[in-house]
Amino acid sequence: MPETTPFAPVRRTAAAACAVVAALALALTGCGTQTVSPASVRGGAGGDGKGAYGSVDCAKAKCIALTFDAGPGKDTPRLLDTLKEEKVPATFFLLGRNHVLAHPETVRRIADEGHEVANHTWSHRILTDLDRDGIREELARTQNAIAKITGHKPTLMRPPQGRTNGDVTDISRELGLSQVLWSATAKDYSTTDSALIERRILDDASADGIILLHDIYDGTVPAVPGIIEKLKERGYAFVTVPQLFAPAVPEPGEVYRP
């Protein structure tokens, strides 16, 4: 993975206002990019909220989605053991090169155990730095690699560092991918302290939230049991990202953030 810090300094542009907005928003989206919350689209028709661990009505339940970026890695099977034991579904935004290709059995297991398999690009390049052909290659190669293993192409993607713009949106729509950002992150790329990772997530957890973690960093997987236990104690129901939207279905090209 060429860049391990999801919140690298924002590249300056000619528009000073865009730089200011990006800095205040922690560079989650490109300047002018509109985001939509799952709750605002939940009234549509489509999915039924059913998953491998049962049905959840997030219009009534206190739902939260656990998501993992940049894997699979060596600790992902251990994470899957925890999720299976706790009956918690998750969404995995997978990297193609050195991850999907290196761990096909883990990718297959993620899908077989009822988790959502999603796209986090081929090599973690910042999509807003690329031309349209480059964006397409980063996303399409991962789509094809995952489909070869699971038999299905993802319908969700997460742009590295959350950076998106009009070109990324257009290519995502072309490839049938919705863009999914997040509401809580532990910045686990910067620490191996599992207790700190747990505390950061618990501090930022909220109903209809989307948690961002990375199953490739040493402190993260050990933090997950405590996160699950304490959020369950607070009354949260864990869902995949698509379940968070049900009965609506995420639209390709849209940028979603709680």
Image (cartoon, rainbow, N blue to C red):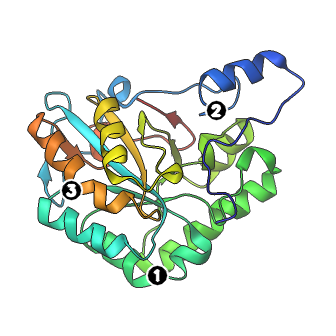
Q: Label 2 to label 1, Cα distance in Å?
A: 30 Å
- Residue 105 lies, in percent from the top left, at 39, 84
Going from the N terminus, do you reach mark 1 or mark 3 first?
1
Quarter of the rendering occupied by the C terminus = top left
Closer-to-camera residue (83/31)? 83
Kind of residue at badge 1: His
Please tell me whether residue 31 is drawn above or below residue 133 in the rendered image.
Answer: above
Q: Are marks 2 and 1 in contact (CB under 8 Å)?
A: no
- What residue did someone put label 3 on? 225
Classify residue 33 as left or right of residue 94: right
Badge 3 marks a residue whose secondary structure is: helix
- Residue 150 lies, in percent from the top left, at 40, 76
Residue 103 numbered tag: 1
Kind of residue at badge 3: Pro
Q: Label 3 to label 2, Cα distance in Å?
A: 29 Å
Quarter of the rendering occupied by the N terminus = bottom right
Badge 2 marks a residue whose secondary structure is: loop
- What residue did someone put label 2 on? 27
Going from the N terminus, do you reach mark 2 or mark 1 first?
2
Dividing the picture into quadrants, the one containing residue 74 is: bottom left
In the rendered image, the residue lying farthest to the right is 14
